[in-house]
Image (tube, rainbow, N blue to C red):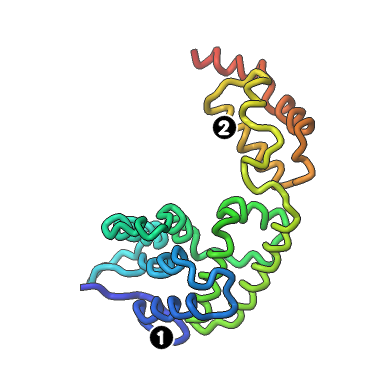
C-alpha cells in the first residue's frame, strides 16, 4: 500500500496533481514546449520520489534521485525509447527539478545554469516549473518562471559559449601544447569552460593558452607524474 505526501494550496493528492500538470503541459499557451513527449514523461515522475511505503518513518533524503531511479526502471521496462524519446534527457530533467528561482541572479549565474542543464533542455525544465506552479495555483512562481525564461532567452541570443564544443581551445590543442590525455587534461578543459562561462570574452585561443600556461605549467605536470611514479 502506498501513501502520498504532497502538500499544495489545493490540497490535492499526487495522482491528481500529476494529471493536472499533464493537462497544462498539453494545453497552456504560456509554454514553449507544449505537448513535448519528453516533457510529458518527465511530468509523470517529477514528484514520484514523494511516494513511500505505508508506515515508513524515515523521509526520503533525495526525492529527485529516487524519482529518476523509478523513472529509469519504468522507461526501460516499457521500452519508452521506441517512442523516439531520449531516456537520458528525461532523467536529467527529473534530477534537476525542482530548482531555485534564478530570475534575479547575474548573467554569469544564468550561463552556468544553462550549461549545467543544456540549451536543448533548459526551456523544458522551465515549462515543467510553470505547469507545476499552475497546478498548485501559485501565480508568483509562474511570474518568476516567465521572467527567468525571458532572461535565459536573452542570454542565449548573445551566443556565449555554452558547451565544450564552443571552446576556442580544445583537447587536441592542449595535446599539441604538450599535455597528455588523462585526468589532468579533463581538469584543464573543465577549468577553461568555467572561465569562459564566467567571462565569455575570454573565449579566445590566445587568452586561453596563456591561462593554461599560467595555471597548469608543463613542468608542474611532469613533477606530479614523477612523484606518482
Report the side of 55 relative to 195 (left or right).
left
* Residue 61 makes an appearance in the image: no
Q: Is residue 210 above or below residue 50?
A: above
Near mark 2 (Cα within 10 A), the count class, few <14, some 14-19 or many ≥20, is few
Q: Where's residue 17, x and y in %?
A: 40, 79
Which residue is drawn at the image coordinates 35% and 62% (left, top)?
60
* Residue 57 makes an appearance in the image: yes
* 113 and 105: which is toward the camera: 113
Q: Is residue 163 above or below residue 18?
A: above
For mark 2, give the secondary structure. helix
* 141 and 125: which is toward the camera: 125
For mark 1, give the secondary structure. loop
When asked about the image quadrant of residue 113, the answer is bottom right
Q: Where's residue 111, x and y in %?
A: 67, 54
- Quadrant housing the N terminus: bottom left
Q: Is residue 98 above or below residue 11?
A: above
Q: Where's residue 79, x and y in %?
A: 30, 57
Which residue is drawn at the image coordinates 32% and 75% (left, top)?
4
Is the C-beta separation of discs 2 and 1 under 8 Å?
Answer: no
Q: Where's residue 124, x and y in %?
A: 54, 65
What distance separates the C-alpha of mark 2 from that of mark 1? 48 Å
The disc label shown at residue 186, or none: 2
| Residue denoted by label 1 | 11
Specify the farthest residue to the left. 1
Amino acid at each position: 500500500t502506498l501513501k502520498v505526501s504532497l502538500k499544495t494550496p489545493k490540497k490535492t493528492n499526487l495522482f491528481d496533481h500529476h494529471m493536472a500538470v499533464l493537462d497544462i503541459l498539453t494545453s497552456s499557451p504560456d509554454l514553449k514546449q507544449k505537448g513535448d513527449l519528453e516533457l510529458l514523461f518527465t511530468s509523470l515522475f517529477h514528484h514520484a520520489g514523494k511516494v513511500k511505503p505505508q508506515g515508513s518513518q524515515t523521509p526520503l533524503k533525495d526525492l529527485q534521485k529516487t524519482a529518476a531511479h523509478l523513472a529509469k526502471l519504468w522507461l526501460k521496462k516499457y521500452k519508452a525509447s521506441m517512442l523516439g524519446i531520449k531516456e537520458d534527457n528525461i532523467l536529467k530533467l527529473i534530477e534537476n527539478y525542482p530548482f531555485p528561482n534564478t530570475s534575479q541572479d547575474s548573467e554569469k549565474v544564468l550561463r552556468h545554469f544553462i550549461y549545467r542543464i543544456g540549451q536543448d533542455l533548459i526551456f523544458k525544465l522551465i515549462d515543467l516549473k510553470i505547469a507545476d506552479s499552475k497546478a498548485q495555483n501559485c501565480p508568483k512562481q509562474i511570474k518568476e518562471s516567465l521572467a527567468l525564461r525571458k532572461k535565459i532567452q536573452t542570454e542565449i541570443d548573445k551566443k556565449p559559449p555554452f558547451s565544450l564544443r564552443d571552446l576556442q581551445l580544445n583537447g587536441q590543442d592542449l595535446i599539441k601544447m604538450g599535455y597528455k590525455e588523462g585526468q589532468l587534461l579533463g581538469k584543464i578543459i573543465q577549468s577553461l569552460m568555467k572561465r569562459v562561462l564566467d567571462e565569455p570574452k575570454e573565449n579566445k585561443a590566445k587568452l586561453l593558452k596563456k591561462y593554461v600556461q599560467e595555471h597548469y605549467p608543463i613542468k608542474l605536470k611532469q613533477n606530479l607524474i614523477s612523484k606518482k611514479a
